[in-house]
Amino acid sequence: MSPSKIVITGTIASGKSTLCKLLEEMGYKVISADEVNRALLEPGSKNFEAIKNSGEFDEAFNNESFDKKALAQIIFSDSQKLKKLNQLTHRNILDEIENQIAKLDESVVFIEIPLFFQMEEKFVANEVWLVVANYETQLQRLMTRDNIDRAYAKSKIESQDQLLTMKENSNVVFDNSTSIENLRKELEIVLKQKDLL
């Protein structure tokens, strides 16, 4: 029997990874799309080869070495290149997640996909759990985490329209504006409601 698939997503610096850590501490299986992608970017792996062979990102490669920072700069300044990169990599990431899920003997599995709502390639989930935080909390966390100034942090935060759409299309919304302890309590309530605890 295939497990129930619950996607964890959220706004930037909202605490998606914190929620996933809490789930792991409670003994649940969590798959990270970012970790899957990191493995697929290793030399010889699917996304490494797809990006390298596309001919669109040559300046990010030096023989077999791959400069992820150079790639980040390329896509940050060119939305078409970002779209191309997503087309090359997202399907491979989702396929690998499905492969990992197929090998599990769990009743439920959580999958952390930060850009779930922004992806053109869709991952079919039983539920979507969204993590949000108030604007000021997001700003402070982002400035601290990425060591950036307030103006740059503001530019990285999603628009309110995006946030509204994300909330409307989620089964559960966690507000992680305060403490980890409060988030843990919120999580325990939801897990009990869903007969997962």
Image (spheres, helix red, strand yellow):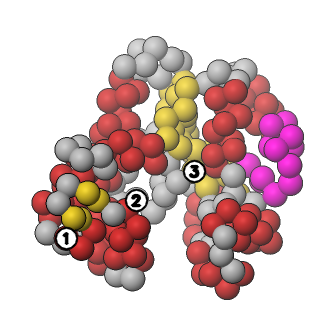
Segment colored magenta: 174-185
Q: Is residue 17 above or below residue 54?
A: above
Residue 101 left/right relative to 129: left
Q: Of label 3 and label 1, which has the lower sequence position?
A: 3
Q: Which residue is mark 1?
A: 58
Q: Residue at x 66, y 70 (%)?
A: 147
- The answer to if 180 sits in the magenta stretch is yes
Label 3 residue SS: strand
Residue 43 left/right relative to 7: left
Observer-side mark, 1 or 2, equals: 1
**Which numbered marker is on residue 92?**
none
Q: Residue at x 77, y 53 (%)?
A: 175
Q: Which residue is mark 3?
A: 9
**Which of the 4 image quadrants contains residue 164?**
bottom right
Label 1 residue SS: helix
155 or 42, which lies in front? 42
Disc 1 residue crowd, few under 14, some 14–19, many 20+, Cα 10 Å: some
Q: Which residue is mark 2?
A: 119
Q: Is residue 157 above or below residue 118?
A: below
Q: Residue at x 58, y 44 (%)?
A: 8
- The answer to if 168 sits in the magenta stretch is no
